[in-house]
Amino acid sequence: MTQEGRVPRFAVLGAGMSGILAAVKLREAGLDFTVFEKAEKVGGTWRENTYPGIACDVPSHLYSYSFELNPDWSYYCSPGAEIQDYFEGVTDRYGLERKMRFGDAVTRCEWRDGMWDVGTASGYRDRFDWVIAATGILHHPKLPDIEGLESFGGSMFHSARWDHSVPLDGRRVGLVGTGSSGVQITGALAHRVARLSVFQRTAQWVVHTDQVEYSEEQRGAFRSDAERLERIRAKMEVDFHDGFATQVLDADSGLSEGIEAQCTKDLETKIADPELREKLRPDYRAACKRLVVSHNFYDAIQHPNTELITESIERVEPEGVRTADGRLHELDVLVLATGFHVDRFMRPMRIVGRDGVLLDEVWEKRPSAYLALAVSGFPNFFMLNGPNSPVGNFSLIETAERQFAYVMQLVERVRRGELSVAEPTAEAAQRFEEERTEAAKKTVWATGCRSWYLDDRGIPFAWPFPFSRFREEMSAPRLEDYRGADA
Ligand code: N01
């Protein structure tokens, strides 16, 4: 069905950071849309992750929509609850809730007769011209494959499913995992609990930072001078994306060595006990795993209540965790900060494209997407922060904004009849994937460590090019890469 001469309809899947962004932009453009959200409120990762100590380690003035700068961020890197409030505030200000369907998960999207037929768990159905999948990456908690896990007699939960009804003060808490989540949890719990047993499988490179709080005076100055805030954000964008986050992924740039030297210096000067220091010293290159940023991990790990355990976990028993040296670490609470299944994206939704092709089959080996956005065979279906997107130490907000602006250019082309639908050709998708894979093998992520950046072949799945290339690609679609698919 042609979209010429009528207002196209959009289904946005997910009301997290990317979904809210899509809704704001679609509203501004006067287009018709529905946002589908399986939970009862907006926020995505910031709604789901409420663990003690949660914060964003990307500076807050950068981790904000470019059109909704916030003079009131309390810290340089603000706590998660404040970020959740920010997203709820944006949703309110733009009156988006009335366009959102909460508490009903999308279970299928099927391309039929030139439109997407979208269905939910409750049986609701509607038809749309476009689907924008904004379902996130770090979304499906991964439980560790540890013998006896289910036999634990105390309280046990994943970091992204924190059970706030479980008391922690004065109790014996075990924590499995020392990624970004585990490190933040350690910082928040060490002084609260009777004993914190941190089970570390692999040491992390930790970038130690100061926690910078914005004074009321500074916030007042941001409020009264919007241009100043814009300048600060623009500078952060250059420093962070083109500088830090881009250079750090280049295995040959001097920056990753510089970061390693700085992290080593912090480790040497901040950890007093030589034995503990060696346990915390990584044996792979800095930034091979996502860099962990913390203002309090080194203090917390040296707190008298904390023990860092590097013996491997043999099994979980009703009383606690048994390590390979035979020792039983008795626990009341066991927290699993063990990461996420990062290859699911909008699955388990059933997504059926042109000629009945199933996304699950196309992605049988692993997910991939043309320019990190679209899949051949799936017309007018675009993902924000989907497979192969820039991850790492970037702001995912800027990524989503640029991706959405790109999609809107295609929407316009289709409305003008220059394309019947927007779908990358199989050749363009394959060419991009081959080039991406080759570049990925040369990144710091591929220098020999285990991390969630690696696919089933051990090749990093993320955007491996400089952020400048991402900006350039997103600035204008190459129409020759699209087919005017028969709708
Ligand atoms: O998860 P992870 P995360 N036995 O996958 C360990 C973002 N984030 O939730 O290193 C023992 O990084 C595993 O050990 P190892 C950010 O992008 C951002 O912490 O694989 N241990 C590792 O230590 C981040 O990268 C913020 O050997 C096991 C940990 O669990 C991403 O989310 C804050 C194990 C998993 O680390 C994911 O971080 C928080 C087992 N069987 C998160 N299985 C910001 O501030 C796993 N582990 C923006």
Image: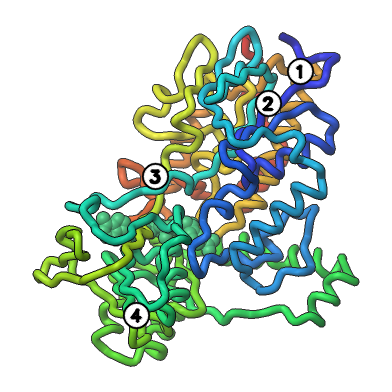
State the CA–CA distance, disc 2 to disc 1.
Answer: 9 Å
Mark 2 vs 1: CB contact within 8 A:
yes
Q: Is residue 99 above or below residue 222?
A: above
Secondary structure, mark 3, is strand
x 67%, y 52%: residue: 398
Circle 1: residue type: Glu
Q: Mark 3 sits on what residue?
A: 341
Which residue is at 81% across, 36% downward? 27
Element on which disc 1 rests: loop
Say which amino acid is labelled 3.
His
Q: Which residue is mark 1?
A: 418
22 above or below 110?
Answer: below
Scheme of colours in the image: rainbow
Residue 297 seen by the camera: yes
Find residue 330 and report its horizontal and vertical position in percent. 22, 71
Residue shown at 28% from the left, 52% from the top: 144
Left or right: residue 260 compared with residue 370: left
Can residue 249 be seen here? The reply is no
Which amino acid type corresponds to the residue marked 4 in the rendered image? Ala
- In the picture of the structure, the residue carrying the numbered disc 4 is 194
Residue 442 horizontal side relative to residue 144, left or right: right
Q: Mark 4 touching mark 2, by CB under 8 A?
A: no
* Tag of residue 298: none
Front position in the image: 195 or 258: 195
Residue at image location 52% in from the left, 59% down from the top: 50
Q: Earlier in the sequence, mark 2 or mark 3?
A: 3
- Residue 37, image x, y percentages: 61, 37
